[in-house]
Image (cartoon, grey):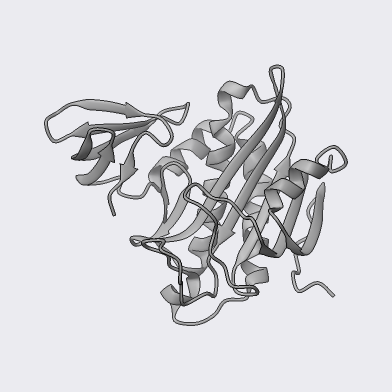
Amino acid sequence: MSEYVLSPLPGLRVVELEETASTNDYARRHAPELRDVLTLVIAEFQSKGRGATGGWESKPGENLLFSLLTHPTQLPPTRMFRLSVAACLAICRALCRFAPGCRIKWPNDIYHGDGKMAGILIENELRGKQITDNIIGIGINVNQQQFESDAPNPTSLALVLGHKVERSLVLDAVVREFHILHVMVQGDAWPEVFAEYKSLLYRKEGIHPFRDSDGIFQASIVDVEQDGNLVLRTTLGETRRYGFKEVQFVI
């Protein structure tokens, strides 16, 4: 019997795996047959899981490792950032139910304080001017309390709260939020969703250190633009725009 008890949602398919190389890779391989509105692929262990800075450290049975697959064929490729917003906001909303104060670290990590609680890896399959498959790989630190990798600042719900959390509850909250948000960002509700995303940005107030190809500098966050660019204003009054991986937060 599955240990994950999820709310029934229209158009949701759930694929549970004990172990796989990567839930994103599984979703991509099986996308032609997984044409439901939303498919959840979840595994207890990923042997070749990926992330923006390498694999996601996770002890079996303690965290959540899963991918969400959708088919937003009506969304132009120029608006792909909206899917990232939906994923970030879904996770942030869900985690805030357990540990208020979670924030979205641009472009797509979830922090509590200065600790990274969740990471997202988004991959899109395009056909001409259509996004045929949107695959969102998610790792959430739920109950792991000791981390052995060289990741600089991992944290988990258990570390923040001082007790373990039922993983099924966390997963259900994320999936329900995303089920709503991935539809909203493709329609007229996009402005209000985007405004909420920006209101939850990590370090959205004050001056903080950042690093780009020229080194470390001090700046404040001015905005996140519709295409996902981060707008900063340096202490010298210079406005700078950065795309993904062009600038780093110095933690």
Residue 53 lies, with reference to residue 81, above or below; the image says below
Give me the residue at 85% from left, 75% from top. 1
Name which residue lies at 59% across and 37% down: 83
| Residue in the image at 53% along x and 64% along y | 57
Quadrant of residue 238 within the rendered picture: top left
Determine the residue located farthest toward the left in the rendered image.
Answer: 236
Can residue 37 be spotted in the picture? no
Relative to 212, 135 lies left or right: right
Q: Most extreme residue toward the top, as rendered?
A: 128
Q: Residue furthest bottom?
A: 163
Q: Is residue 231 above or below residue 62?
A: above
The foreground one among 197 and 217 is 217
Classify 242 as above or below 170.
Answer: above
Q: Position of residue 244 (x, y in %)?
A: 43, 34
Residue 58, relative to residue 208: is it above or below? below
**In the rendering, at what x and y percent does residue 72 appear?**
71, 32
> Considering the image in quadrants, where does the C terminus appear?
bottom left
- Seen from the viewer's position, the closer of residues 231 and 139 is 139
Q: Is residue 188 left or right of residue 199?
A: right
> With 231 as the anchor, is 102 left or right in this view?
right
Q: Is residue 215 visible?
A: yes
Q: Residue at 62%, 49% (x, y): give it.
A: 137
- Residue 139 position within the rendered picture, expressed as x and y whole percent measured from the top left: 57, 58
Query: Residue 14 occupies which quadrant of the picture?
Result: bottom right
The number of callouts visible is 0
Location of residue 33 in the rendering, given as x and y in whole percent from the top left corner:
88, 41
